[in-house]
Image (tube, rainbow, N blue to C red):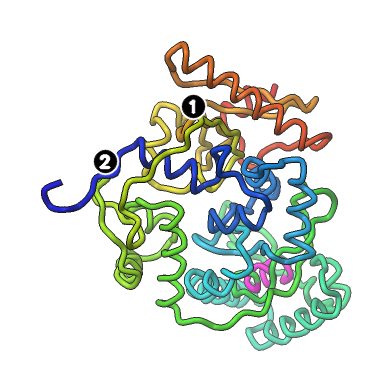
Amino acid sequence: MGDGVRYIGVAERRARLGLRHRLAGVARAKAPAEVAESLVALHGTDPATVYLAVGARLADATTTVTATERALYEERTLVRMHGMRHTVFVFPTGLTAVVHASTGLAVAARERASLVKDMAKAGAPDAAWLKEVEESALAALARRGQATAAELAQDEPRLREQFAYAAGKSYEGVHTVATRLLRVLGVEGKVVRGRPLGSWTSSQFRWAPAPEHPELDVAQAQAELLRHWLAVCGPATEADLKWWTGWRVTEVRRALTAIGAQAVSVDEGTGYVVDGDAGPVAGPEEPWAALLPGLDPTAMGWQQRDWYLAPELRPSLFDRSGNVGPTVWWNGRVVGAWAQRADGEIVWRLLTDLEPAERSAAEAAVAVEAERVREWMGPARVTPRFRTPMERELSK
């Protein structure tokens, strides 16, 4: 281009995605921690998403459950904690300090203030009382190593205290101190999600003390997190960055400047890559297919998604809150949806028109991936937490 800014088109963006998100066969990972390092974060709101996202990217998917559980609960190379946009993710342990400083501190301050305010409105004990209960609960958790809220309440009965919230409103209800306090402690980086109660598909979990990490400067941490993410997802626009991080636009721009991000041109306007990453990237030689779960970090990675997800597919593939369901991918774009039926069968449907020869190749590759998913999942049954029209239809 005349202004010296390189244009990165859709084909190259899809090639980068296939390689850097470890979806192309040649790029698949050996271990779950390698997957998380490559993606920066795995969505952890729905516990099964983590395993399904990892399994889609492992060279040997048969190790998905055992290797991921080992990484999360024994080796502690992965940590499930609150992160960007007040959402639960699974991060590489080495990034916990960066995530906490860059995204958690501001949210944590608001969460604690909200809890104290709600308790005061309900006539519940004050902030000093809450701090005392907090310290007692954290000491109990340290002794136990991991514990459910109910187990912690055995050691600290004041966690069972209840208070009303939103009185007079349609969503009024009753909270226990444990429910709200443990959530605040999670956002503050003092506790993290531990081993679930039951299998890897369970949404009930224990709490565990957060790993030790240094306190970092907020601006430096934001720059570091943005650098990690752009290395995986660049090029990305300012709108993408603001959406993914949940930061103010001034914070995004400050971080871009701090890391010396390089401007490029994409179809949506100006995009950014890490310094030195603007050169051409060749795609994988072999075509590839993937079955990704709902809330997968690739499908949810950008706010502006037209380059990999056709707008006409969105009503079928997203719920009303904007959560993506299970998707079928072919060479860097979403082409369909999939689901698991009650008998364990993996069913899928292509929703995009393809030329006959390409459609035949895509169908054959997707069938292989579907069988791969069925084999490693075995007897496990998964229903996405956020269900979409197409997933509901296919799962019948």
Q: Does the magenta stretch include residue 47?
A: no
Disc 2 + disc 1, Cβ < 8 Å = no
The residue lying at 79 percent from left, 67 percent from top is 149
The residue lying at 39 percent from left, 31 percent from top is 311
Q: Mark on residue 267?
A: 2
Q: Mark on residue 335?
A: 1
Label 2 neighbour load within 10 Å: few <14, some 14-19, many 20+: few
Could you say where residue 337 lies in the image, as x and y percent from the top left? Answer: 57, 28
Could you say where residue 243 lies in the image, as x and y percent from the top left? Answer: 40, 55
The span from disc 2 to disc 1 (Cα, nearest Å) is: 20 Å
Q: Quadrant of residue 90?
A: bottom right
- Left or right? Give the position of 342 relative to 7: right
- Left or right? Give the position of 271 relative to 111: left
Q: What stretch is highlighted in magenta?
A: 177-185
Task: Out of 214 and 243, give the one closest to the viewer.
Answer: 214
Q: Earlier in the sequence, mark 2 or mark 1?
A: 2
Q: Does the magenta stretch include residue 184?
A: yes
Q: Does 239 sit above or below residue 57?
A: below
The image quadrant where one finds the C terminus is top right
What's under tag 1, amino acid-wise?
A: Val
The residue lying at 60 percent from left, 33 percent from top is 291
Label 1 neighbour load within 10 Å: few <14, some 14-19, many 20+: many
Could you say where residue 12 lies in the image, as x and y percent from the top left? Answer: 36, 40
Secondary element type, mark 2? loop
Q: Does 139 sit above or below residue 75?
A: below
Q: In which quarter of the image is residue 193?
A: bottom right
Task: Out of 10 and 136, give the one closest to the viewer.
Answer: 10
The residue at the far top in this view is 356
The residue at the far left in this view is 2
Secondary element type, mark 1? strand
Q: Which secondary structure is most common in the magenta stretch?
A: helix
Task: Out of 299 and 173, give the one closest to the viewer.
Answer: 299
